[in-house]
């Protein structure tokens, strides 16, 4: 045994050395997986089909056009409910496809999904929700209230009954900002005008929306309707009853001339702005992308022939003011219970607008 | 090394070289990997460094915000009435503090963006103002080259004023320089859009141009994509100034980021030695592995070579064995018939008196002996070649050696009418230690050779010595002839086996051409040497020299006398015997051999039974008891060894313990041992020589069965010297006849009685002389035919004495002459006179028949 060992000592030594060499090689190769430069790939999560004729569709249009312009690949997942259970597999799917930046295109993807989002620290998320504290998530939205103000000027000028109707989805700052801006716009040209608001308690309860719209016409005497919900049922009701209406979000149908205009998002410039920042590396912005007329993210749909030529310059003038940093919520503003919310030489901060506007200005009547 | 091995070695070497190359290649990969690892380390180092630097710098920039925060304290939380007063205070403070600072412009804007103090800033050009109008403070870059710090003065949730501070890059350079970060090399403050705001002092305008280049900007924007989570990012890039770590770090709440680059070597110089060490170890390991591998390959080649050599050796040994077996067979096949020829010839010589027939028989004997010696030469040669001959040193008498040679060679020389002169240095020690047989063989071969190639003149054998020390001498022998000699070019070939010169000229010379080769090989074996001098046509001289030990330095003197002395010393020796009570069984498949045996042993009176097969022998053994069995080895069906085993194993038979002697023509070295191992008591070579056979038998015959009345005739005569016997014998004596013979001068009564003692004893002696003539004459004749001149001499000596006893002076003188001849090996004389002596001797039978 010993002799055999001695005879083969060189062979044994040789194989030992070979093993050592092999081990060194193995160690070096295993411990040095080179990392590759992350390729930017965009993901999109949509609450509905991207052909829903409403919210998801215009988001998709904006996002896909922006990606195309910037030369970035895009992956999407549709029909994702605004909760963690649905969001998690959707995010997972996109990350597995290599997405480094994911857009959550509905306001419901907020803190309810925080854990899901934070479990992907290397992925940057952008959500429409204003209420998301995930460290890797930024908020983006358009200052649609600016357009509400302008459409309010049209409505204030054209109302005969001095009663305007507003169908609200849920009673949230997002809707309330629009309501207040709409009324302030109308009031700026018509001091006697009143705004009646009916909430339906949901974004897409079509039946409740129809009832609310009809009540505004028949019970409240509103002669111009507008709304803030997923589907333009209010417009259908107004058209059916020959009442003036102002649309929201997008215009996907041909309407009658009673359809005066619509406040619409132009998502493409916003997406392009975000993507440009991503490409430049400016990703970790703490402030929300809350862009308005200045960036062309919100606008008014073409006016109907019913809109008097005389007020158009006024609208243009106000549009120009927005573009120069003017705001709806600047100067003296009283809550409908008489409390002064803003002083003459003051301006309501974005924080207050985004998170604290659960009140209505004087002259707005709300039916819960 | 065979081709296969060489091929596989080449392949192994090729594999090894390939392995080496692969490992070196891997070395480069490893080197790169290590570089990568080092770079990673460097990256991490830089990344941490720059992140910290970014944080620190962010906090430094926040100082500007604090200044504005201080001012804002004046503008808020006060009652409306004091607003104007507060505003004035703030303005005066601003003016006091920053009046002497040309790089800074401060201003206060109202909520609608209109200027209260300082300039109104357009939100299109000053993005930060809008941010602050929306309620957030901001640090934003201005395309004009400065940085705008803006700060909202909040009243509750509402923005009341916006304070701003416009800082030129000169101002920032002065108060927010980047020179505190030594390890970061060239450091800059850049805007989101890639504009350089502040640089560290080690950045030249060339550097600025470089950092503004498209490639550098691409690197920074790539870095900024990555720094979102870690707040900083690093990448190693190849530049004209060598490898550099490019890095970026965010500055919170601002349009700005920190960026720059630092040379790789500056960062990793500390740990680069690790790589050097690692690579050193790696290559050392490879080197070790290679060296070991080469060592192993060489070792394995050696092993394989030695294995091949072993195989080759085994094959060669097998071939040599086969040759030995073949030679053994041949020796058997050749020697057996020679044995028969010699034996039968001996019978003729003994039993037929016709002189011409005897001459023919004698010629046959000579030819057969020559043939036998040829066969022996071949056997010797092959034994030497096979290394089966060893030198066995024994004490021997030089004089005996010389006399043997002379005895053997003189006849040969005489036949060709050549002289053979032998001279031995008288001072030479007489008793030496060495292998007598081999020394004799050397000299005999040389002399035989000399005689062979000499046609006129003769041969001189000179034996001399040279003392080396007290124990050793050089035995020097020289054989000189007047023969045909050799050409110089042939001298070298003389010792080559089977080589003979002038084949055509010498074709009549017999021999296998092995004699000289055997001489040479024997000399090699005994560490001797040989020298050859030769002149073509004149003669040759062979001188050899071997070391011999000396038993005693007593000089030999005249070697002839030494021989005589020796013979005299041996006179008491009883070479022959008579044992009529002994029964011998001889087994041989060749009947003639049995006849020869019977003939040879006839006069010993032993009773011989013969069989021609092992089976027959066993049959005989059942009913008879034999003292000695002579068994031939090679027999069909049952060979000698099988037969022996059967005999030995049958312990119930008395014969199982009988003496068994192997007879064989198997004379290959080691045969004897083999036979003894198999159970034979002894072993005898064929052809059987009578004297040797007798000696052998004598060894095994118990003394009490021996009748030692061989040659001591005189003694027997003397033993009869008793009066009673004399009287009894004398009664029937024909005295007249004795007197008549005396008168004829054939015998001499007077001398006879004088030698015998009494008249009666003389008569007895006379009668005994007459009665023993047949036996004695036959004995003499037998020794004569056997060329056994030692015994012949003894017998003739005895005849001389006994003839003298009866007063047969002529006969006695003739016997004396022959005795003398035998003594000095004058064989020719014996051959000429033996017949005459014996005829005369035998004639006494007739002469004395009437006594």
Image (spheres, helix red, strand yellow):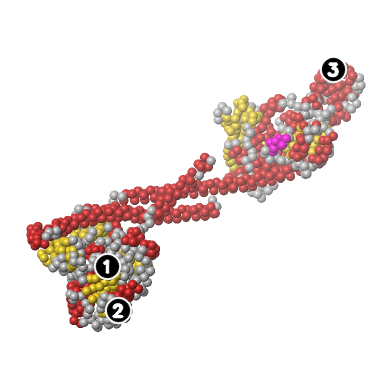
Give the chain letter at badge 1: A
Residue B673 falls inside the magenta stretch: yes
* Cβ atoms under marks 2 and 3 closer than 8 Å: no
Which numbered disc, 2 or 1, marks the residue closer to the eye? Answer: 2
Picture coordinates of residue B485, whole percent (x, y): 62, 44
Considering depth in this image, is B828 or B153 the residue closer to the camera?
A: B153
Picture coordinates of residue A75, whole percent (x, y): 36, 68
Which residue is painted at 25% across and 65% down in the image?
A358
Residue A101 in sight in this render: no
Residue A147, relative to residue B533: is it above or below? Answer: below
Q: Quadrant of residue B636?
A: top right
Q: Dot 3: few (<14), some (14–19), or many (≥20) neighbours within 10 Å?
A: few
Q: Quadrant of residue B428?
A: top right
Residue A27, relative to residue B95: is it above or below? Answer: above
Q: Who comes first in sequence, dot 2 or dot 1?
A: 1
Q: Are marks 2 and 3 on the same chain?
A: no
Picture coordinates of residue A45, whole percent (x, y): 35, 67
Q: Are marks 1 and 3 on the same chain?
A: no
User: Mark 2 = which residue?
Assistant: A238
Q: Secondary structure at mark 3?
A: loop
Which numbered disc, 1 or 3, marks the residue closer to the eye? Answer: 1
Start-end of magenta stretch: B671-679
Residue lying farthest top?
B723
Residue B339 falls inside the magenta stretch: no
Picture coordinates of residue B60, whole percent (x, y): 19, 55
Dot label at residue B722: 3
């Amino acid at each position: 045994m010993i002799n055999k060992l001695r005879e083969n000592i060189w062979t044994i030594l040789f194989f030992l050395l070979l093993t050592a060499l092999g081990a060194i090689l193995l160690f070096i190769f295993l411990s040095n997986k080179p990392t590759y430069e992350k390729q930017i790939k965009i993901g999109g999560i949509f609450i509905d089909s991207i052909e829903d004729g409403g919210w998801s569709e215009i988001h998709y249009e904006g996002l896909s056009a922006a990606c195309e312009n910037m030369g970035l690949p895009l992956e999407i997942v549709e029909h994702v409910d605004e909760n963690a259970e649905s969001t998690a597999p959707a995010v997972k799917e996109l990350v597995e496809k290599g997405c480094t930046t994911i857009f959550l295109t509905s306001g419901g993807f907020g803190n309810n999904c925080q854990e899901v989002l934070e479990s992907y620290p290397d992925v940057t998320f952008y959500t429409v929700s204003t209420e998301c504290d995930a460290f890797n998530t930024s908020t983006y939205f358009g200052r649609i209230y600016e357009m509400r103000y302008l459409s309010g000027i049209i409505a204030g000028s054209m109302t005969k009954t001095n009663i305007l109707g507003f169908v609200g989805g849920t009673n949230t700052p997002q809707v309330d900002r629009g309501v207040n801006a709409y009324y302030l716009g109308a009031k700026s040209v018509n001091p006697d005008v009143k705004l009646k608001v009916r909430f339906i308690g949901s974004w897409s309860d079509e039946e409740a929306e129809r009832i609310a719209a009809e009540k505004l016409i028949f019970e409240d005497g509103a002669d111009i309707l507008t709304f803030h919900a997923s589907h333009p049922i209010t417009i259908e009701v107004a058209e059916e009853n020959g009442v003036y209406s102002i649309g929201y979000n997008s215009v996907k149908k041909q309407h009658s001339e009673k359809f005066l205009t619509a406040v619409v998002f132009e998502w493409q410039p916003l997406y392009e702005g975000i993507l440009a920042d991503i490409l430049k590396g400016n990703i970790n912005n703490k402030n929300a992308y809350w862009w308005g007329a200045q960036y062309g993210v919100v606008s008014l749909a073409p006016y109907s022939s019913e809109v008097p030529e005389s007020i158009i310059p006024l609208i243009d003038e106000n549009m120009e003011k927005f573009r120069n940093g003017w705001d709806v919520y600047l100067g003296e503003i009283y809550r409908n219970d008489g409390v002064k919310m803003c002083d003459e030489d003051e301006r309501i901060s974005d924080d207050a607008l985004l998170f604290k506007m659960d009140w209505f200005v004087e002259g707005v009547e709300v039916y819960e | 090394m065979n081709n296969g091995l060489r091929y596989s070695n080449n392949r192994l070497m090729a594999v090894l070289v390939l392995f080496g190359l692969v490992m070196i290649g891997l070395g480069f990969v490893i080197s790169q990997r290590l570089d990568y690892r080092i770079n990673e380390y460097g990256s991490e180092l830089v990344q941490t460094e720059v992140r910290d630097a970014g944080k620190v710098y962010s906090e430094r920039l926040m100082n500007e915000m604090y200044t504005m925060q201080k001012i804002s304290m004046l503008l808020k939380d006060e009652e409306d009435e004091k607003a104007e007063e507060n505003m004035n205070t703030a303005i005066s403070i601003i003016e006091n503090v920053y009046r002497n600072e040309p790089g800074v412009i401060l201003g206060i804007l109202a909520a609608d963006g209109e200027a209260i103090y300082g300039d109104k800033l357009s939100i299109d050009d000053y993005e930060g103002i809008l941010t602050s109008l929306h309620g957030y403070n901001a640090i934003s870059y201005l395309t004009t080259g400065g940085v705008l710090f803006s700060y909202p003065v909040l009243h509750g949730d509402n923005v009341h004023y916006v304070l701003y501070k416009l800082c030129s890059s000169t101002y920032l350079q002065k108060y927010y320089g980047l020179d505190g970060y030594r390890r970061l090399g060239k450091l800059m403050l850049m805007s989101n859009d890639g504009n350089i705001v502040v640089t560290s002092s080690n950045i030249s305008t060339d550097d600025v141009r470089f950092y503004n280049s498209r490639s550098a900007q691409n690197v920074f924007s790539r870095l900024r994509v990555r720094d979102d989570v870690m707040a900083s990012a690093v990448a190693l890039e190849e530049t004209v100034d060598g490898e550099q770590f490019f890095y970026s770090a965010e500055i919170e709440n601002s349009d700005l980021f920190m960026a720059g680059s630092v040379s790789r070597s500056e960062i990793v110089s500390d740990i680069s030695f690790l790589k050097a060490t690692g690579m050193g170890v790696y290559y050392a390991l490879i080197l070790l592995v290679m060296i070991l591998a080469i060592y192993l390959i060489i070792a394995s080649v050696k092993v394989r070579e030695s294995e091949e050599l072993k195989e080759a050796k085994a094959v060669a040994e097998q071939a040599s064995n086969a040759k030995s077996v073949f030679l053994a067979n041949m020796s058997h096949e050749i020697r057996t018939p020679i044995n028969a020829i010699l034996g039968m010839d001996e019978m003729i010589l003994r039993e037929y008196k016709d002189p011409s027939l005897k001459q023919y028989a004698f010629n046959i004997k000579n030819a057969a002996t020559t043939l036998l010696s040829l066969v022996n030469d071949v056997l010797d040669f092959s034994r030497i070649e096979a290394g089966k001959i060893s030198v066995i040193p024994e004490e021997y008498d030089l004089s005996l050696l010389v006399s043997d040679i002379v005895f053997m060679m003189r006849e040969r020389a005489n036949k060709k009418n050549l002289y053979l002169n032998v001279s031995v240095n008288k001072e030479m020690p007489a008793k030496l230690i060495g292998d007598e047989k081999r020394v004799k063989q050397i000299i005999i071969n040389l002399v035989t050779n000399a005689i062979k190639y000499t046609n006129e003149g003769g041969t001189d054998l000179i034996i001399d010595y040279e003392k080396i020390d007290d124990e050793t001498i050089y035995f020097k022998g020289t054989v000189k002839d007047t023969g045909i000699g050799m050409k110089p070019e042939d001298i070298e070939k003389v010792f080559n086996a089977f080589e003979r010169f002038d084949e055509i000229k010498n074709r009549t010379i017999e021999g296998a051409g092995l004699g000289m080769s055997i001489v040479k090989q024997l000399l090699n074996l005994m560490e001797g040497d040989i020298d050859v001098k030769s002149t073509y046509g004149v003669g040759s001289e062979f001188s050899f020299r071997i070391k011999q030990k000396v038993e005693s330095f007593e000089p030999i003197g005249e070697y002839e006398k030494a021989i005589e002395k020796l013979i005299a010393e041996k006179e008491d020796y009883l070479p022959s015997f008579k044992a009529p009570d002994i029964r011998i069984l001889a087994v041989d498949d060749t009947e003639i051999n049995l006849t020869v045996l019977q003939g040879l042993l006839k006069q010993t009176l032993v009773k011989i039974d013969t069989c021609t097969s092992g089976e027959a022998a066993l049959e005989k053994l059942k009913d008879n008891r034999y003292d000695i069995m002579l068994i031939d080895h090679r027999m069909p069906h049952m060979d000698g060894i099988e037969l022996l085993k059967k005999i030995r194993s049958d312990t119930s038979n008395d014969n199982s313990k009988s003496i068994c002697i192997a007879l064989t023509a198997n004379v290959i070295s080691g045969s004897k041992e083999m036979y003894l191992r198999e159970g034979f008591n002894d072993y005898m070579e064929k052809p059987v020589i009578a004297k040797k056979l007798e000696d052998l038998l004598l060894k095994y015959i118990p003394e009490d069965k021996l009748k030692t009345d061989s040659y001591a005739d005189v003694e027997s005569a003397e033993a009869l010297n008793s009066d009673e016997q004399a009287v009894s014998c004398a009664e029937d004596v024909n005295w007249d006849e004795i007197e008549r013979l005396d008168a004829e001068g054939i015998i001499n009564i007077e001398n006879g009685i004088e030698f015998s003692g009494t008249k009666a004893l003389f008569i007895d002696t006379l009668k005994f002389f007459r009665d023993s003539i047949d036996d004695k004459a036959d004995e003499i004749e037998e020794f004569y035919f056997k060329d056994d001149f030692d015994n012949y001499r003894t017998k003739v000596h005895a005849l001389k004495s006994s003839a003298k006893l009866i007063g047969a002076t002529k006969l006695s003188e003739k016997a004396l002459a022959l005795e003398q001849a035998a003594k000095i090996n004058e064989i020719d004389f014996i051959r000429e006179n033996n017949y005459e002596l014996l005829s005369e001797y035998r004639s006494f039978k007739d002469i004395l028949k009437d006594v």
